Image (tube, coloured by chain):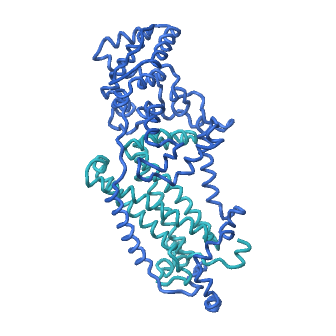
Chain colours: A blue, B cyan
Amino acid sequence: MPKYQNPEDIYPSKEGDLIKEMLVAFIFVSVLITALALIFKSPFEPPVTIRQTAENNPVLFEQTAMRDLMGTSAIAAYGPPYDSGPAQQSLGKFSPEQWAGVSVPVNASDVYVFTPLEAASNINPDIRNVLAEFNSATDAQKAAWENNYYNALQNSTGTAGIISVSNGDYGPVESMMNYLLGLGKSGFMDSSLNNGAEYNNGVYAYNFSRSLLFLQGETLTDIAAQKGLLGSQLGIIKDISPYPGPWWLILYSYLYQIPPYSTAAAGDLLVALTMVGVFLAILFLPFIPVLNRIPYYIPVYKIIWRRWYKNRNEFSSITQDKQ
Amino acid sequence: MNLTKTLRDKIERDLPMEHLLPDKLPIYVSSFVYMFGILTLTSFIVIILSGVIMVLEGPTWYQFSAAGFIFRSIHFWGVQVFFFFLFLHFFSVFFTAGWREGRFATWAIGTFLLMFSIIEAFTGILMEGGFFAQWNQVQSKDAFNSLGLSGIFNTLNNGQLYGLHVSAIPAALILLLIIHIILIRQKGVVPPVQPRQKRHA
């Protein structure tokens, strides 16, 4: 005897053919999906590159690089998993980010400024001289040059990949940035950032952490805003217009728009923990009072089984006989 | 103890063939809502088949060739159709209190299937190859980093995402799906709510 009493052994039955149902369903969804694919195709907006940014918005490129050099960019001050600083996502002593440590090391000034310039200095000795002048300066002098140039950038103009800033005491920083801008415009930054010895010299160049971390922030945010893809625009459900996006992530995305998630310093951790909580609530829903009664408060089941309830008396004698 | 015989006896006892592949169904199984699960499953098969073809040919094929882009589009719309039917299936099971009479394990496995499906689709978006992927990669990294998952789920590492998307998560989904279907066939389709259940759940 089966261990479980299957209702198929108890209730009155009718002819059924699961395999045929499945074949019909498979043909139906195959035709539906193929028709949608042929008529509407699928969304594809080419990726943004560092080269494009350097050409189209050189001021933003240099501002990003300057913040990385000065250690004030979001990535330079991120903490784990990119550097060993304090984690930003902590609730008291609860900080999985801190516990996990540095798994994707990114020293922003080295990765985005010094390493590319040092590589380029092999074909342009002047870059070596500029770097030597910067490196031999005191920290106070470096900070003064950096601040002067960064402030000058706020009022600078840049078109077609060329920047003009007012005269000032920038030391070698202006030259460093202009050389870096040249590397950005050449496409060198795009290819070299994800290509070092730690990625087997490019043979396993699948990890785009470094280039994406350079582009993240203002660069990608500006483009996303133009396309209506910001969280505040419920961008997650839209994809590239007019295609539907991952609408099933609406709760995850919406949480970011409301307090306390939108205001808390550890908003990301709060959202992540809330989603874990939602999963556990659904998992154990059959045991959660009130929630497990919703199907009885809103009796949709009466519609689904309306024929059964209507003819129940007719079937009950057969059911009792089988039980 | 003969393990082979023990397993065979267990299968024969718990899942006889007339329950695994029934040609008769309870008379209360007469609503279109019972198609939602099958439509979800068959959409999943379309996604897997299109995905396997895409993997065999490679990203540049499905991104830039006319034939490849059709399969990319089938994969994209397959996921939309899959989630449409998945949520209809989820709500129909919820509103029929489908966990009743010893079916919690079926519900629990279904919940894990829902979670893994969302993560699977998410990894697909993150390696879609265009601006939308880049944007979601940088936007979502903070939540995964905050949970300390950057080592195994770095949203900026396309190689890692590719491995998760085409092997690890599909393997988990297929395994859970098999268990889910076995449990459904073992326990049978949940019967209509009885008056005493309405009172005591």
**Quadrant assignment for the C terminus of chain A:** bottom right
Left or right for A144, reference A127: right
Image quadrant of residue B78? bottom left
- Residue A321 percent across, percent down from the top left: 63, 92
Residue drawn at x 44%, y 81% as measured from the top left:
A17
In this rendering, the count of numbered labels is 0
Left or right for A54, reference A63: left
Residue drawn at x 33%, y 21% as measured from the top left:
A182
Residue furthest out toward the left: B66
- Residue A205 percent across, percent down from the top left: 35, 37
Residue drawn at x 49%, y 43% as measured from the top left:
B152
- Residue A123 percent across, percent down from the top left: 28, 17
Q: Is residue A178 above or below residue B198?
A: above
Q: Nearer the viewer, residue B79 or B4?
A: B79
Q: Is residue A120 above or below residue A303?
A: above
Left or right for B162, reference B145: left
